[in-house]
């Protein structure tokens, strides 16, 4: 029962999200406008090149925010089919391996039970794992490790992603899933919110645990969801 948000609560969240989007997009727009005005007011080539660089960075920021937000809307080509979780994990690792290696991070996968296929939108689930692993990579300073464990827990597949990063301070833990909450210079603060939205739309659940020794994210996904429509 508490899982299901009331319509009024949904509207409230949508409103907060919209306000956040406006704010996050308006800031770079204001800066773009300002630098265009500046470059129109003078003809110094070097300065104008510098302004153009800033304008480009700001446009890329808007693009990033909009691309991430797009995963929140129901994908029109939502594609639910049976997927091998182990294979999906391998594909995710392939995508993210270079980034991990460059940061001196070992990624281990340990699958205890032979995992059954689950019905899910492959790209959405990949998005979840990428967001989580990326956060771990970004949190780990110098070198460290990320472990992805998979096992069966009753009628669910249980995935657990653990990192050896510095963890999330207790006073921030309740804020990290708020849209646009970030502690990173170039973060969007959308990653975890999107993860939860995708997992819950698959009738699963997500739980975040953190201490000074690192962060652990548990994901439960139901095994029998043949009739699921996203
Ligand atoms: P972003 O990565 O753009 O900041 P997220 O929603 O992915 O947005 O994460 C929100 C915040 O949660 C991060 O800015 C960071 O402070 C914190 N966080 C998330 N994952 C981890 C992690 N594995 N270790 C430490 N902090 C984390
Ligand atoms: Mg993130």
Image (spheres, grey):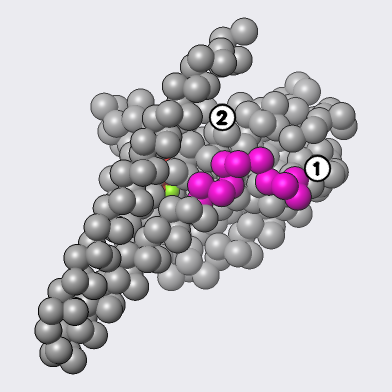
Main secondary structure found in the magenta portion: loop
Vertical placement of residue 129 versus 218, above or below: below
Where residue 143 is drawn, which disc sits there? none
Residue beneath label 2, please? 206
Ligand 1 within 8 Å of the CB at mark 2: no
Vertical placement of residue 206 versus 96, above or below: above
The disc, 1 or 2, on the residue closer to the chain's N-terminal end is 1
Q: Which of the 4 image quadrants contains residue 42?
A: bottom left
Residue 65 visible at all: yes
Where residue 80 is drawn, which disc sits there? 1
Vertical placement of residue 224 versus 67, above or below: above
Q: Is residue 77 magenta?
A: yes
User: How many numbered discs?
Assistant: 2
Give the class, few, some or many, for how many residues have Cα within 10 Å of label 1's Cα (few <14, many ≥20): many
The local secondary structure at tag 1 comes to strand
- Report whether 138 appears left or right of 130: left
Residue 209 visible at all: no
Q: Nearer the viewer, mark 1 or mark 2?
A: 1
Vertical placement of residue 136 versus 203, above or below: below
Residue at figure coordinates x 15%, y 74% from the top left: 38
Residue at figure coordinates x 45%, y 58% from the top left: 64
User: What are the residue bounds of the magenta stretch?
Assistant: 68-78
Measuring from the top left, give residue 16's x and y in whole percent. Answer: 39, 30
């Amino acid at each position: 029962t508490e899982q299901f948000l009331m319509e009024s609560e949904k509207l409230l969240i949508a409103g907060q999200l919209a306000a956040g989007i406006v704010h996050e997009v308006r800031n770079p727009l204001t800066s773009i406008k300002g630098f265009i005005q500046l470059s129109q007011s003078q003809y110094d080539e070097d300065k104008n090149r510098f302004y153009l660089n800033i304008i480009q960075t700001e446009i890329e920021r808007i693009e990033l925010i909009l691309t991430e937000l797009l995963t929140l809307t129901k994908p029109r080509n939502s594609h639910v089919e049976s997927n091998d979780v182990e294979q999906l994990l391998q594909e995710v690792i392939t995508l993210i391996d270079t980034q991990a290696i460059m940061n001196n991070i070992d990624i281990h996968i340990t699958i205890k039970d032979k995992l059954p296929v689950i019905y899910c939108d492959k790209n959405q689930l990949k998005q979840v794992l990428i967001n989580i692993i990326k956060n771990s990579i970004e949190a780990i300073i110098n070198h460290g490790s990320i472990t992805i464990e998979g096992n069966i827990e009753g009628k669910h597949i249980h995935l657990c992603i653990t990192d050896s990063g510095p963890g999330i301070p207790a006073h921030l833990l309740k804020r990290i899933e708020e849209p646009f909450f970030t502690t990173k210079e170039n973060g969007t603060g959308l990653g975890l919110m999107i993860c939860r939205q995708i997992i819950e739309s698959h009738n699963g659940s997500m739980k975040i645990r953190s201490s000074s020794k690192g962060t652990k994210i548990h994901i439960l996904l139901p095994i029998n969801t043949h009739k699921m429509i996203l």
